[in-house]
Amino acid sequence: MRSSARCWSRKAAKSRWPICRSRFAKSRRPRPTSSSHHTDAREIEKMAILQTLQRTNWNKQEAAQILGLYRPTLYSKMKKHDIRDAGKAARAPLERADRAAT
């Protein structure tokens, strides 16, 4: 009975279910480095956005719907990942040519 008494903390004493820290302590497994984990998640997100934009011919409204995002959120993620609008860049020379012709 005494060993379980050590598991009681002041908070636990007030609650109905006391938690023994030694019993439920997190394991001491080595954690992956946070930078590699974040890099992988960022790369996956960037690739998903790029693939969806290419599939929709850079239609951002449609891409946002496919990704389950709001359009402004897609724009902010594009800015975060430094994704430039390739559809806009492809249209720019055509617009310049039209202006020069008139």
Image: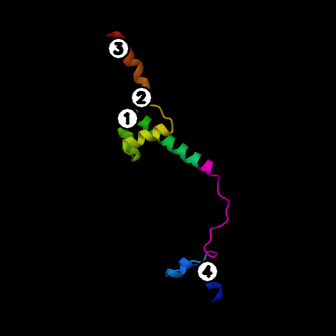
Give the foreground label among 2 and 4: 4
Residue 14 x, y percent position in the rendering? 51, 81
For mark 3, give the secondary structure.
helix
User: What residue type is disc 3 on?
Assistant: Arg
Magenta: predominant secondary structure element?
loop
Above/below status of 31 relative to 90: below
Q: Which mark is residue 7?
A: 4
What range is drawn magenta here?
A: 21-37
Among numbered discs 3 and 2, the one appearing first in the sequence: 2
Distance, label 4 to label 1, CA atoms, is: 58 Å
Horizontal side of residue 19 vs 59, given as left or right: right
Q: Do callouts 3 and 4 mark residues in contact (Cβ within 8 Å)?
A: no
* CB-based contact (under 8 Å), mark 4 and mark 1: no
Q: Say the numbered circle drawn on residue 99.
A: 3
| Crowd rating for badge 4 (residues with CA inside 10 Å; few <14, some 14–19, many 20+) | some
Question: Which residue bears the numbered disc 2?
Answer: 87
State the residue in front, 54 or 9.
Answer: 9
Task: Please provide percent x and percent y for residue 102.
Answer: 31, 10
> Which mark is first along the chain, 4 or 2?
4
Compared with 43, 21 (above or below) is below
The residue beneath circle 1 is 59
Asked if one can make out residue 1 in the rendered structure from this viewpoint, the answer is: yes
Q: In which quadrant of the rendered image does the N terminus lie?
A: bottom right
Label 3 to label 1: alpha-carbon separation: 24 Å
CA distance for labels 2 and 4: 62 Å
Q: Are marks 2 and 1 in contact (CB under 8 Å)?
A: yes
The disc labelled 4 sits on which kind of residue? Cys
| The magenta stretch spans residue 65 | no
Q: Amino acid at mark 1?
A: Asn
Of the residues tagged 3 and 1, which is closer to the observer? 3
